Image: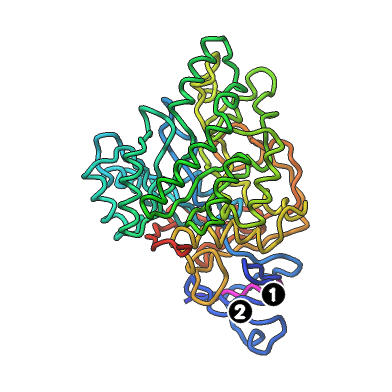
Amino acid sequence: MSRTVIHGGLVVTASDEIHADVLIEGGRVVALAAHGADVAAGWSADRRIDATGKYVIPGGVDAHTHMEMPFGGTYAADTFETGTRAAAWGGTTTIVDFAIQGIGRSLQEGLDAWHTKADGKCAVDYAFHMILSDVNKSSLKEMDRLVAEGVTSFKLFMAYPGVFYSDDGQILRAMQRASGNGGLIMMHAENGIAIDVLVEQALAEGRTDPRHHGDVRKVALEAEATHRAIQLARVAGSPLYVVHVSADEAVAEIAAARHQGFPVFGETCPQYLFLSTDNLAEPGFEGAKYVCSTPLRPREHQEALWRGLRNNELQVVSTDHCPFCFTGQKDLGRGDFSKIPNGLPGVENRMDLLHQAVVDGHISRRRWIDIACASPARMFGLHPRKGTIAPGADADIVVYDPEAEQVLSAATHHMNVDYSAYEGKRITGRVETVLSRGVPVIEGGAYVGRAGHGTYVPRGLSHCL
């Protein structure tokens, strides 16, 4: 088996920062030893990577992506091949994507369809959540089997009536099932019934521009749905993970539940931390680039999100990567904001943006690794194989240059989309080398991986419960 030594760097995990060398063999981390220790000096290796002056960090775990997702009459622009390649460029070595149950179809049919999309295509490792679009007796029974087979989380929607929406009774039944089989319920928490009324009224009044997407998806309707989801989970005795939290009032609902000891968790995304309604209001149709749900909020909400991340009221930063090109996809909604495909590109930018948050003083280095690597791995049954650098873990490792500078741009990114949500943003920090299970994927500023290297990873139960 090939052996690799990464030497000279600062190893940063969620729990420690140590100047250590890392020995890799057979795709796994074998040992760590302090710089200059006799044991490290004696390690033989086929490959040596000099990380002097660099961070050595776990590969990122992005627990919320949508590759090739059908939405609004089109498909997300990144395939599993292009999307996982872009993820690697950004230092993410595992994604958890969402398989979708079609209305009137079984969970297994949806899962099989997503395996077909991904198998043999991915540059890095991947796993699946399951979107429950049709909660019924049959799909509830299927949940047990999927948990046993390593699909241990299920997403429901309080939004998008007629597409993904589940009513409170369906949600309660799914939560009750999860409370028995150990699965984790993920919730898109927005009051979709009320939002549809506000959309209809806005369009009737001639308010059709992209900025009105944010206007109708009220903060109060995210907070109300978050509160309602928490209460349903309490009744069911089920844990709850609220996805893409964007608003201060929703954070407050999650914090209140956690302070009472309920197993409620929250995720936010870089777009809510770095973008705002100012972007939705950009002139002309430019705001369409920033249409996503939950929507971007006024800038004053950002401090509540950062505080929630520091206080562990929010545990994970994922991307909700669901890219649609500005030309040919986003412009389906010219003259009607409700027809703009919802979603932003970001799988390549997450680790860098969060390192910028370290530079800016929002979070510590270890918290960066916690919310981007360790916590998502623990939350979704991938730890300790993923999300850390420790003996026995997969050698998903990034050598990161904390001093390098870059400017984010569509001209240089590797996502299959024609714009960047962060165009022109200056970032301090950059990925230098990426290993996936010990195999180089990014090296010397070049992609050296291949489609099909990434393997499907069945997941265990959440380690956070």
Q: Is residue 273 above or below residue 1?
A: above
Residue 278 or residue 290, whichever sits in front: 278
**Most extreme residue toward the top, as rendered?**
205
Q: Nearer the viewer, mark 1 or mark 2?
A: 1
Q: Is residue 308 above or below residue 438?
A: above
Can residue 86 be spotted in the picture? no
Residue 85 screen position, x and y as percent:
53, 49
Q: Which quarter shows the C terminus? A: bottom left
**Most extreme residue toward the left, as rendered?**
138
Quadrant in which residue 210 is drawn: top right
Residue 257 or residue 314, whichever sits in front: 257
Residue 439 or residue 187, whichever sits in front: 187
CA distance separating discs 1 and 2:
10 Å
Residue drawn at x 71%, y 75% is: 19
Residue drawn at x 57%, y 55% is: 315
Q: Which residue is mark 2?
A: 32
Residue 86 screen position, x and y as percent:
56, 47
Residue drawn at x 50%, y 45% is: 243
| Amino acid type of the residue that numbered disc 2 sits on in the rendered structure | Leu
N-terminal label among 1 and 2: 1
Residue 457 screen position, x and y as percent:
40, 60
Asked whether disc 1 touches disc 2, contact meaning CB atoms under 8 Å apart, the reply is yes
The dot on residue 18 is: 1
Residue 169 screen position, x and y as percent:
32, 39
Residue 105 lies left or right of residue 346; in this view the side is left
Residue drawn at x 54%, y 55% is: 258
**Dot 2 lies on which element?**
strand
Whether the magenta-drawn stretch holds residue 311 is answered as no
Label 1 Cα crowd, 10 Å radius (few <14 / some 14-19 / many 20+):
some
In this picture, which residue range is highlighted in magenta? 3-9
**Dot 1 lies on which element?**
strand
Whether the magenta-drawn stretch holds residue 6 is answered as yes
